[in-house]
Image (cartoon, grey):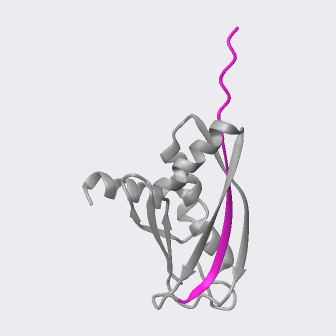
Amino acid sequence: MGMKDTLRRWYYNLLPSYRGSGGWVTYLAPDWREVKVKLPLNLWTRNYVGTTFCGSMYAAVAPFYMAMIAMNLGLEYVVWDKTVSIQFKKPGQSTLYAHFKLEEADLNAIKAELEAKRSTERTYQIDLVDTAGVVHVSFEEVIYIRRKRAEKTA
């Protein structure tokens, strides 16, 4: 990874809106198609009973698929988080990890669908796992995507 990639990752980690999650981006691909995140269990992420706070869990993973799609499609598209469902499976008692991967085929399918209709949605599964790969929480996130409207001319 080059210096530019490292600086971009650090910039994202230091954004106040993301920093407050307690999550840390450990890898951010130059093409924004792959991201890896860790969420340590520490003073900032621990809840009343000593496990990872559920708000930290979601905040650590929430921005990525939306940002990855937006960065890959470009400024002529509107990309928003629409819904999320969360299934807590096991209390977080150690550092947790998430891996996001956006495939070229998915981007091509989005563009093709938006040639025929105004908007589309994509659903992504995100798991926070421990070092042994045990899933502690699963998120199912729905992303809304549409082309921006052309500006009206006078």
As drawn, 33 above or below 112: below
Any magenta on residue 95? no
As drawn, 144 above or below 35: above
Dominant secondary structure, magenta:
strand
From this viewpoint, which residue is outermost toward the top? 154
Which of these two is toward me, 81 or 57? 81
As drawn, 92 above or below 150: below
As drawn, 111 above or below 87: above
Q: Locate residue 49 relative to residue 105 in the image: left or right.
A: right
**Region of the chain picked out in magenta, as a range:** 134-154
**Image location of residue 113, percent across then percent down:** 64, 44
Q: Locate residue 140 relative to residue 65 in the image: left or right.
A: right
Q: In the rendered image, which quarter is residue 92 located in?
A: bottom right
**Image location of residue 91, percent across then percent down:** 64, 90
Q: In the rendered image, which quarter is residue 52 located in?
A: bottom right
Q: Locate residue 115 relative to residue 16 in the image: left or right.
A: right
Which of these two is toward me, 106 or 63? 106
Any magenta on residue 152? yes
Which of these two is toward me, 146 or 39? 146
